[in-house]
Amino acid sequence: MDNLVKVHAGGTNYDSDFSDDEKQGETSESRLKRKHEEDILQKPFQKGRHAQVAHRNFHSNEVDREEARNRRAHLISLTAFERHKKFVGDYILFYGGHMADFKRSTANDKTDSDVLRENHRFLWRDEDEEDMTWEKELAKKYYDKLFKEYCIADLSRYKENKFGFRWRTESEVVSGKGQFQCGNKRCEKQEGLKSWEVNFAYVEHGDKKNALVKLRLCPECSFKLNYHHKRKEVKAQKMARKVQEENQEPSRKKKKTKKHKHRKQRDPSTSPSSTEESRGKDSEAEDGPECQSESDHWRGPAPAVEEKSREEEFDDYFEDLFL
């Protein structure tokens, strides 16, 4: 019993050989229970208490990579001249120097629009395509993208008898500017449009040239165009001729039938054979060269009939439609 219980002066203390084991067993059970509860209460995105921490070198490498990506994206977004200025500024910042040493004259700098203005042609000819440089090739590519059916006019100086013309761009063709809207640059009217043919005389690169262009203008802008002398108005003459021919065809057929009946009434004593011959002659006379007799087929080869291509038919159709 002396080994089991010991009495001290400060109070009683119960001690035994199994006390350490029981304490360890209680602490282990409580520890397992606490861990189980923590696992239950832990959120899916929550990290553990003893998660691994990245090394300092790994973190610095990732920061350097991100900084390099940002610098590369910034350099790509700059133009060539802005990139050059940035590199010069960085060189002066790190190695020293003055910005005045790197300045240059910008008087000879040209943009693409400047090159187009200098080498533009209203109409390109075979002579202009000789000795092509990159500036001329750039202007020729721009010219090929223009639509040369109708022109856009600048009538602001019509009282001085000075006009400016240019071809239409793709956006203007889609919006109908110059064809279904007035061709004046500062007018957007769509009613009462008329088509005009203008002999455009201009000076280009020191040479006098002229070109026949078409315009679609409203009545007010047409007055400005014809302020000094009358221009030629384009009308749909082909369509008018077709309508007249279609209207004349039934009247011709009626006249032919009346003549045929009148001949029958005048010659009642004619035999059936003679009437058949007269009918054959009348039909040949009406049909003309298109319907030939049997004997005519053996005289020579049939006349060649020229057939229009699909593009020519479309051109004829649109020519009558747009005027």
Image (cartoon, rainbow, N blue to C red):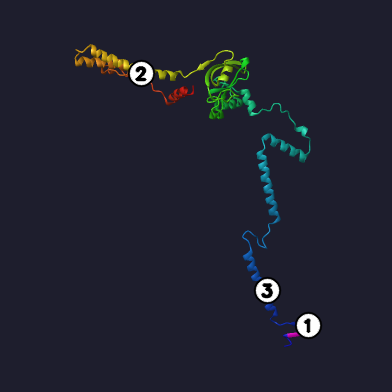
Q: Which mark is residue 27?
A: 3
Q: What secondary structure characterizes most of the magenta part?
A: strand
> What's the magenta region?
5-12
Q: Nearer the viewer, mark 2 or mark 1?
A: 2
Residue in the image at 63% along x and 26% along y: 115
Q: Position of residue 140 (x, y in %)?
A: 57, 25
Give the farthest residue toward the top.
266
Are dots 3 and 1 in contact, CB under 8 Å? no
Give the farthest residue toward the bottom.
1
**Element at label 3:** helix
Are dots 2 and 1 in contact, CB under 8 Å? no
Q: Does residue 13 appear left or right of residue 214 in this picture?
A: right
Closer to the chain start, of discs 3 and 1, is 1
Residue ID for mark 1: 11
Q: Which amino acid type is shown beneath numbered disc 1?
A: Gly
Residue 9 lies within the magenta run: yes
